[in-house]
Amino acid sequence: MFIRRTALRSLLIGLTVAAVVAPACAAHADPSPEEIQAKIDQGNKDLELVVEQYNKTTGDLTATQAAITKLEDGLKPLQTDMEAAQAGAEQVAINAYKTGNNLRTWSLMLGASSSDGFVDRVGTLEQISRNQQHDIAAYSAAKGTYDTEKNRLNEQLAAQTRQKTELETKRKQIEGDIARLDDMQRKADEAAAKAKTPTKTTTTTTSTSASSTAGCGSGAGTVVKFACAQLGKKYVFATAGPNTYDCSGLTMAAWKAAGVTLPHNAAQQWGKVKHISRSQLVPGDLVFYNGLGHVGIYIGNNQIIHAPNSRTVVKVAPIDVDSLYGYGRP
């Protein structure tokens, strides 16, 4: 009995070890070049969404900064009015003090340590004439408006600071993702070289054949001409030229050349353009992809010019290069 139990225990232990070791060994198996490429492709799609959100947040931050500047400019005349009203009220107090009228009260007013304390004390005096009371009331109203606007300004500044911190965090995350993707690409190339079999790559070359650049001919419109002039320029996220672009930065700059303003974000561009069908496309129209994470410029012949990702450049590609979302005309 003891022998059978020992043998059974050994068998169970052996099976347990085998069950643990087998998956562990399988988990450490090197992925195939195709699997690595699939991860890179998915990583690119994920990064597109992050980059476009980064662009949107940057645009929102710019708008906040403009609002803060406007508030500061609006506060300046209020500050002037407040100082003038306070000076007038103080002069009333000084004149009354010199005549000895309610000496102790006026002395307390002149000794007030703040403008608010000064106004509170002035408001308790019945001896002040109506004109003088009007001056004090004007000061009080100006001070109240000033304080309200100043509080709003402080809140916006605090929000701006938080946004800046979030943007920096997102930027570091994006850079880290890009670095990891580059490393995956290198490993895929090394694996392909060892196996002597080519891997599927869609982001490392720029087509320069006559057919691929046919849309860049002399008959091209302003938008397409601009896009064609950017071919070969490097992709850098959150940029809109003149030397580097991301996808929505390229479309924004191209349409700006034609006098049309677009935001630096694919989803926001979709919100501003007229939505059209594929059969209605003409060169210069925008083609949206990946759940509004990517956008390119249609140049005719079922082709686009776009800025794909950080490992390549502005290039021509088939219109079906990514999962299509829709078509738009600014």
Image: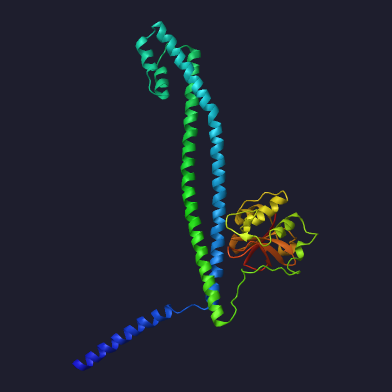
Quadrant in which the N terminus appears: bottom left
Give the image location of residue 89, x and y in percent. Answer: 46, 16
Residue 311 placed where, x, y %?
58, 65
Residue at point 54%, 81% (across, down): 194
Q: Is residue 229 above or below residue 144?
A: below
As drawn, which residue projects farthest toward the right?
219
Q: Is residue 314 visible?
A: yes
Toward the top, the furthest residue is 99
| Nearer-the-camera pick, 245 or 129 | 245
In percent of width and height, residue 295 lies at: 64, 60
Asked if residue 149 is positioned above or below residue 174 in the image, the reply reads above
Residue 220 lies, with reference to residue 92, above or below; the image says below
At a point 42% along the width and 81% down the height, the residue shown is: 26
Asked which quadrant contains residue 120, the reply is top left
Above-or-below relation of 121 to 241: above
Rendering coords of residue 252 (x, y %)? 66, 53
Of the pair 167 and 144, the residue shown nearer to us: 167
Front-lying residue, 285 or 196: 196
| Observer able to see residue 138 | no
Relative to 55, 168 lies left or right: left
- Say whether residue 236 is left or right of residue 87: right
Image quadrant in which you'd find residue 269: bottom right
